[in-house]
Image (cartoon, helix red, strand yellow):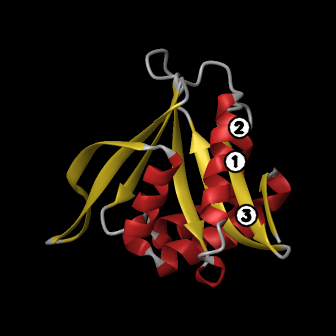
């Protein structure tokens, strides 16, 4: 049974553990490195959740399969007058044991539904590394539109770069 919900600060330890798992298993998919997240620690992760709780466009969602946390995604918005109409998705990840069950779709749909209800949000943005073909197919299927490709978006090593495709979902 799949259950997706907006997480609370009490969920931070489990979300942090899942985030570390994501960064360890799929390091090329994320801007944040495992070492950065470990340096911030569980307390830093919880503090970011606490700070973002003040804005209804900022949230972390968890996906549960048979009661176990198996996926997560977050949203944020930049609090500046010229871009406050945009929300951003970060950190979508589903544990390998729970893939192909629809959790990523459920997480994204929960985010879209929640952001539709936030006054002033008109569009939702995300980026995805170009090697993530399943994720790209899912985004397109949900109605996200590609609007660009940032070559060499992330530098992982002296001659190791990752490109990112930019997507937008228009709520209006």
Residue drawn at (66%, 65%), measured in percent from left and top? Answer: 103
**Is residue 52 visible in this depiction of the protein?**
no
Q: Give the x, y percent position of residue 109.
A: 65, 48
The residue that disc 1 covers is 110
The residue that disc 2 covers is 114
Residue drawn at (32%, 69%), measured in percent from left and top? Answer: 131
Q: Give the x, y percent position of residue 117.
A: 71, 28
Tell me the element at label 2. helix
Say whether marks 1 and 3 touch (CB < 8 Å).
no
Residue drawn at (52%, 51%), measured in percent from left and top? Answer: 90
Q: Give the x, y percent position of residue 164.
A: 30, 55
The residue that disc 3 covers is 63
Q: CA distance from mark 1 to mark 3?
A: 10 Å
Tell me the element at label 3. strand
Q: CA distance from mark 2 to mark 3?
A: 15 Å
Q: Earlier in the sequence, mark 1 or mark 3?
A: 3
Tell me the element at label 1. helix
């Amino acid at each position: 049974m799949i259950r997706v919900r907006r997480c609370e600060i009490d969920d931070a330890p489990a979300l942090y553990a899942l985030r570390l798992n994501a960064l360890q298993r799929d390091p090329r998919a994320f801007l944040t490195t495992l070492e950065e997240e470990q340096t911030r620690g569980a307390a830093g992760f919880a503090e970011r959740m606490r700070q973002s709780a003040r804005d209804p466009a900022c949230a972390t969602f968890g996906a549960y399969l048979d009661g176990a946390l198996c996926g997560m995604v977050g949203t944020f918005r930049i609090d500046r007058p010229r871009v406050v109409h945009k929300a951003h998705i970060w950190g979508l990840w589903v544990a390998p044991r729970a893939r192909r069950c629809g959790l990523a779709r459920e997480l994204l749909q929960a985010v879209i539904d929640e952001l539709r209800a936030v006054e002033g949000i008109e569009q939702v943005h995300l980026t995805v590394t170009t090697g993530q073909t399943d994720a790209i197919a899912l985004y397109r299927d949900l109605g996200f539109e590609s609007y660009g490709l940032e070559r060499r978006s992330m530098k992982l090593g002296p001659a190791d770069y990752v490109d990112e495709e930019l997507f937008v979902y228009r709520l209006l």
